[in-house]
Image: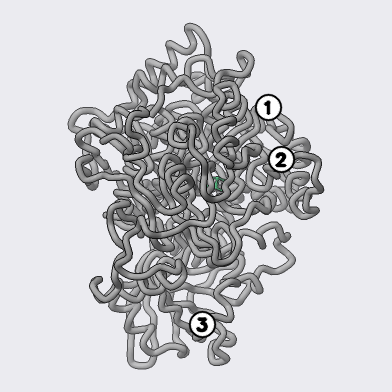
Amino acid sequence: MSGWAHHDGLAVGLARENIDTDQLIPARFMSAPRNAGYGRFLLHDLRGEPGFALDDPAAKGASVLVARRNFGGGSSREAAVYALVDAGFRAVIAPSFGDIFAGNAVNNGLLPARVTTGAAEALLACLPAALAIDLAAQTIALGDLTLSFDIDPIWKTKLLNGWDDIDLTASYRAEIAGYAKARRGAAPWVWPNETRGDPAPTTGSDQ
Amino acid sequence: MKSLFDKLWDDHVITRRDDGAALLWVDRHYVHEGSHHAFARLAERGLPVAQPALTVGVADHYVPTRRDGGAVDADIARMIDTLTRNAGRHDLRFFGLGDRRQGIVHVMGPEQGLTLPGMLVVCGDSHTSTHGGLGAYGFGIGATEVAHVLATQTIWQKKPRRLRLSFTGRAAPGVGAKDMALHWISVLGADGARGHAVEYAGEAVRALSVEGRLTLCNLSIEGGARCGMVAPDAVTLDWLRGRSFAPTGDAFDRAAETWLALASDTGAVFDREERVDMADVAPIVTWGTSPEDAAPITATVPDPARAPKAQAPRIAEALDYMGLRAGQPLTSVAVDQVFIGSCTNGRIEDLRAAAAVLAGRRAKVPGLVSPGSTLIKAQAEAEGLDRVFLDAGLEWVEAGCSMCVGMNGDLVAPGKRCASSTNRNFRGRQGPGARTHLMSPAMVAAAAVTGHLADVRPLLEGRT
Ligand code: SF4
C-alpha cells in the first residue's frame, strides 16, 4: 500500500445513518477471492432503490463518500472496505465510524474522515460535487467551503506513509521473543494442553 | 488504582511507539472460514504462522445445519475446505465438521476453556467481544490484522477509553442479559460506546451466570464498544473448572489467584461512567434496522412525526423497510418464523429458557433451533430439550452460525418477518429483504407460540 497526502475527487452523498457493513457488502458475496474485484458488490442490495445516490449518473467516478453517523458499524468484514476501494473510493466522510471498519479502512489506504454533524450536513447539501482533501492539514475544501476533519494521529501517519505493519513489526522481533518467554512463565495456561475428555457444556444454573 | 481493563492492557504491552500505539501480545487467535483473505496474504508473502499453538481454527460461519446427506452448495463446501486445508498446512488445532466439539467460535472457545480470564483474544469477527464474559480482553479485527496476528502473534492498538456501565438492582422475572444489553444500546445508541472498553459492573451483572455474561459482552459491539468485560469471580471459576483446555489441580488454583486479582481496584478511574437501573429494564424487542431501535415489548412502534427532527427520516425509513405502522402496539406485529441460536443466545441456558416457554405448547409459525455447539446439542438432547422443540413444531438442527447471517443458506425470505435470538437486525442481515426482530430466546419462544411479538412474562406464570 502506498501513502497519500492529497486527494481531489468527486464526492457523492449518502444521506443515511448507520450504513452498516452488511449493507456495504452483503454476506453472500464474501467468499470471492480478493483479486476477483469487490467493487460490484458495494451497497449491492440498495442499488435500484428509488433515488439511491450511487445510481445517479452524476455520481459516476466518485471517489469520496459522505454519509451520516455510525458509518461502517457492525461486522469486522474487511470486504466492506474492499468493496469501497475497488469501486474507486479513497475517503469516507461522516460524523462517526464503526471502530473496526475505520481500522480496516486505514489498512487499505481509505481515509475515514470524522466531521461534525453540521459539517456533514453542509457537505450533503451540495453533493455531488468536486472537493479536495488535504490529509496533512486535515481539511476538506469544496468551493468556498473549507472544513476540518478529525483522524486518529496514528491512522493519519499510517495513511501518509502507507506503512505495512508486518514489516514494521518485524523490527521488534527481539522484544516480541522476550515478551513471549516472560508470558510463558507468568501464564503457562495460555499454551493449551488438552487435559481431559469433553466437559459438560455448562455448570450454570437456569436463568 | 487500576481498572480491570488497565490490568489486561498493561499485561499485554510489548512495546510502545512515540505516536501512542502499543504493540500487544495475542494469547489466543481464533480463525474461521472468513479468514481466507488473511491466509491468502500470508501465502503471498510466504510467511509461516508465528504461534500455531495459540491459533485455533473453527468451522462455523458456513457450516450446513442440516447434515442429513443432502448436497452441500459447492461455494460453501469450498469455504470449509479452504479453512481445513489452511489449518492443516499451518498445523493449527482445528475443530471442523464432524468434531464433537465444533461450534460457533464464541461459544466453543469458552466452552473448551480455550479462552481463559486475563487472555487477550482476537478473531476476524466483531463478536469476539463475547470472550470478555470470562474476564478476557477480546476484540474483533479485520483481515489485514488477522494476517498480522498470524505472522507475528501481536497487534498494534491504541488504548481505548474506559467506560464502566453499572447495572443497579436485580433483574425482574422474564428479564435477562439480552434485555440488559438491548436496553443500554437503545439508550446510548449503536455508536454510544464507540472507542471505549466497557466494564460491566453492578449487582445485576454479578448475579448473571457465565452464559449471561457472555451474552452481555457479545452485544458490546452493537453499542459500538471495542470490547466488553466482566471481572472474573467465583462464578467464573466454577464454570471453568474441568473444561478441556483449562489448567488442572494446583495449576488451576494458581491461575485462579491471578484471575481474581484482575478485578478493578477500589477507586480505579474510568474515563466515563454510565448507570442503568434494572427497574427500567423490561423484556425488549427491536422494531427497526439497528440494534439501537429497541423498546420494551409493552411499547408501541415509534412515530417519526413525533420523533426529534434529526431522527425522523431514519425512523421512517426503518419502518418502511420493516413494514410497520407508526403507533401500532409491538404486540400486534405478526411474525412469519422464528430463529433460536447464534453466538449471542445459542448456549444451553438459552435453550432451556426457550424450552421453558415452549413446553406443552405449539408454535403457530415455523422455526429453526440451532445450538451454539455440537456439545450443547448433545447436552440439550440429554435434557430432553430437543423433544420440547420438536413437539412444539420447530426444527432442531446442527450447530453453526446458521440464520444469524445466512451464509450457510439458512435464510429468511424477502419480506418475511423473523423473531430472532441473534444480534443484528440490519437490513438484509438474514437474507435480502428479510425483516429481523431481535429479542431474548424466551421472547422468541413467546413469539413462536403466539404468532406475534409477545410479552413472555404471562407465559412464564407458574413455570419458573
Ligand atoms: S453467530 Fe452470527 S454474530 Fe455470531 S459469529 Fe456467527 S455470524 Fe457472527
Label number found at residue B48:
2
Whole-number angstrom distance, CA of label 3 to CA of label 1? 47 Å
Name the amino acid, label 2.
Pro
Q: Quadrant of the C terminus of chain B?
A: top left
- In which image quadrant can residue B396 be found? top right
Image quarter for residue B265? top left
Same chain for marks 2 and 1? yes
Pick the front one: A38 or B60: B60
From what the image shows, is residue B128 above or below residue A83? above
- The residue at 51%/59% (across/down) is B417
Q: Amino acid at mark 1?
A: Arg
Name the residue carrying label 3: A52
Residue A162 lies, in percent from the top left, at: 55, 63
Residue B209: x %, y % from top left: 38, 27
Compute the Cα span from label 2 to label 3.
Answer: 45 Å
Name which residue lies at 38% across and 34% down. Answer: B10
What is the chain identity of the residue bearing mark 1?
B
Q: Identify the element where label 2 is drawn.
A: loop
Q: Residue B431, located in which quarter of the rendered image?
A: bottom right
